Amino acid sequence: MTALPDSRLSRWAPLAALLTTSVLLTACGSGGEDSGGTSGPAKSGGTLTFAVGSDAGCVDPQQVGSNESIYSVRQIVDSLTDQDPGTGKIVPWLAKSWDIDSRATTFTFHLRSGVTFSDGSELTAQVVKDNFDAVPRLGALGTLAQGYLSGVESTTVVDPLTVKVTFKQPNAQFLQATSTHSLGIESAASVQRSPQQKCSDGVVGSGPFVLKQYVQNQSITLARRTGYDWGSSRWSKKGEAYLDKLVFKVVPEAGVRAGSLQSGQVDAISSVGRANEAALQGGQVTLLRRANPGVVFGLGVNNSRPLLKDVKVRRAILAAVDRKQIADTVFPTGTRPATSVLAHTTPDYTDLSSDLAFNAAKAKSLLDAAGWKASSDGVRTKGGKKLSLTISWFPNAATNQPALELVQQQLKAVGIDVVLKQGQVSQFATTLQGGDFDLVWSNVTRSDPDILRSSFSTQLANFYRLPASSLDTDLSGQAATTNADKRSELVGEAQKLIVQNAYNVPVVELQTQLAVTKKVHDLDFDSGSRIQLHDTWIG
Amino acid sequence: MRRYVIKRLAQAVGVLWAAYTVSFLVLEFLPGDPVSAMAGAGMDSGEVDPARLAALRHEYGFDKPVLVQYVEYLGRAVRGDFGDAISTGRPVTSTLADALPQTLQLTGAALLLAVVLGGGLAVVATYTSQRWLRQLLLSLPPLGVSVPTFWVGLLLVETFSFRLHWFPAFGNDGLRGLVLPAVTLAVPTGAQVAQVLAKSLLTALDQAYVETARAKGAGRWRVHLRHALRNASLPALTVVGLLVGQLIAGSVVVETVFSRDGLGRVTAAAVTAQDIPLVQGVVVFGALIFVATNLVVDLVYPLLDPRIVVASGRKASLA
């Protein structure tokens, strides 16, 4: 369906390149943080119309995992905590404060008083307990929330405004998890409904906006909650939100989204790809971009495969990939090449760019040293065997195929033959579980470095078949400490071990790119590179 | 006549059963697993718990033997129950029922436009005595059939919505929102109507009865419309049955380009999510519409041309 914009882009490629450069300059000029120019003080009122590309078929924040649905449902619920996107620090929201025991197994939250849900009921420790107790019953859509609460032993009500969550094992990531939409708090009546009812009819939250109407595959309409007075401590406006109404329209075709924004039919759009950037230049439009935190897009290595067991071969792949070329050719403008296994927006990220520098000569000498000899057809051999690997990939993003075709060329240049193996998106989980892959193209969005433990600890699923090593110690150590400095040190150590042993081949940071008209102000990303619209205004 | 009707009804039921069975088999043997698809949705989750997957499989009955699943589901489907969609948990039948009016509106408007414009084109092209004009008009239908629908749609949106601001680019709201998608969908369909009707009109105009009519002093328009068109419309009517199928298929693209809700969008979403109950519902429902249209066409035939029942009856008695 993107065939038209793509072909149009290639015909006008030189012009497009020129124009996107100027868009980038304008975006930088406007300062990034504030999407508006000079238009006076913030004012209340108005409707923001936001076109998104898809609808997950569900309006329960605890259940959805798709970014495009999170944009809207996030506004319905408040969370116990919030996370500062700049520092990664966890700050108060529904919880005024919290205590964590030294082993990071017990989390006690002290709730704000006077918070009400839009059905009039009050926020109490019991409601929070009911929410967390119901999470395991959420079903297939609720895997995010279930993951955050896995290993929970009990949730207890200490007093009407104090709730205590106890885990069987140390679980430092839980504090950040309480800041996500997945653990957004819903009213007692909402929690009692079945997951299906919550999906189709929506939920009652205490958030700055209330769900008014949901038409599947069409639109989600939200209205401002009057009397709202318990916003996150990091929001600039106190009390109610500025906007009267939020309308999210589902517009699957990227070209139609871009045209609708240009022609003023909508105020903001999501999922702006490189192909649409040229179409959006010049008008009254600002592009907003932020790298998604978590594990960057890259090649997950099956470390148990005979060819890939050899660290020299893995390191050769690491050195043979020209990340900058891939980021600049395939991905939206501003996309950063990976400089660690974590994106630079993840708390405790460590810059390892020197380990990830492109160096074809180094790759070749590593392969020579590993005994893989260059041959006439360009593919190296050892003992009559060809150095041939498959990359499994799934069409969940339009950028996957062109990115991997570049990787294929780059590896070919140092003598590694790569076969690209496309699967169904739905096969992703089973492929990882089954282990029948050499390399797999994937990423994970999460604004807590504990995501490294989920992906690389040999004590969990260990999809990448890593051997047990000191990496495990670092990963379980960071999950068990509440000391920020110590945790940062362990997370840094883990990143080094993963990159230097080439357990994974980081390639590019996934970037979320939105476009808004110039009359939209303060539409900012949250720590997960999603949006919070309480402070947003139109003028 | 009764025998003819019963035979046609039996055929219709057979087609429905075949559609159900084939779609069941295809979905059964397709690689991938709808339950892990849901569990790994968005790929934001790092871990998928095998025990949870097993529980979900049990919940949806995917752990039973294939034959048992087939018989159970078929039994329920006959009673109009296709179960709940995996992706939303809503009953399949109510999901389809909600989407149906939108698609009927769209396909109905498109069919009307296709018949009026395509038919009009065929009549004018075959009527004109200007050779160059006829050639020009007759070259339009092949063009209309061959341009991709989504391209036509994007072109219309670009011109009439983004530039001229006459119509909205997306949504299901009212008559104005219906114009561009209906025109888009009517282009290939109308082109086919024009192709078939023009061809049979040209054939009819060569027939002896047309000569007779002319000899009796009937005017050119009268001969063209009263005599030739009436006879030529029979093959075109046959095509209408096929066109309905094509319109439903085309709605997947048109509803996506114009962000309209409807069966096409439901289909696209169901296939992407490998939502087996929903895909099954869509396939059988699509087949039902197709079969019903063709049944109506088949039953209207004998009214226009009694020879059809006679021929069919003779064949039946021979068998």
Image (tube, grey):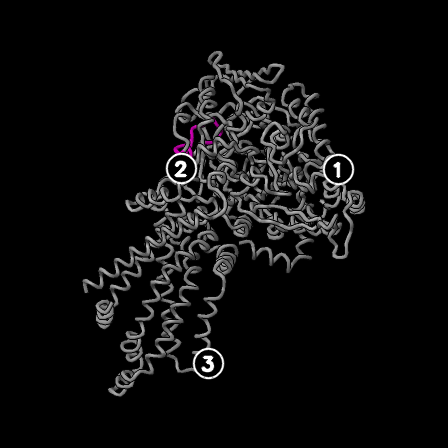
Q: Is residue A201 magenta-colored? A: yes
The first of marks 3 and 2 along the sequence is 2
Residue under label 2, please give it: B60
Residue A342 drawn at (x, y percent): 67, 34
Q: Is residue A256 magenta-colored? A: no
Residue B28 drawn at (x, y percent): 43, 46
Kindly give the residue lying farthest to the left in the view shown.
Answer: B2
- Between A43 and B117, the residue placed more toward the observer is B117
Q: Is residue A296 left or right of residue A382?
A: left
What mark, if any, has residue A395 been given in the picture? Answer: none
Do discs 2 and 1 share a chain? no
Q: Quadrant of residue B138?
A: bottom left
Q: Is residue A266 left or right of residue B70?
A: right
What mark, if any, has residue A353 been given in the picture? Answer: 1
Task: Kindly identify which chain the residue marked by label 1 belongs to.
Answer: A
Residue B164, compared with residue A145, is above or below; it is below
- Between A413 and A23, the residue placed more toward the observer is A413
Residues drawn in magenta = A196-209
Q: How many other residues sit within 10 Å of disc 3, few (<14), some (14-19) or many (≥20)? A: few
- SS class, disc 2: helix
Which of discs 3 and 2 lies nearer the camera? The answer is 2
Quarter the C terminus of chain A occupies: top right
Residue A86, compared with residue A54, is above or below; it is above
The residues tagged by marks 1 and 3 sit, at their Cα atoms, a distance apart of 69 Å
What mark, if any, has residue B132 been given in the picture? Answer: 3
- SS class, disc 3: helix
Q: Is residue A13 left or right of residue A217?
A: right
Q: How many other residues sit within 10 Å of disc 2, few (<14), some (14-19) or many (≥20)? A: some
Task: Kindly identify which chain the residue marked by label 2 belongs to.
Answer: B
Residue type at mark 1? Ser
Q: Can residue B262 be seen in the rendering of this structure? A: no
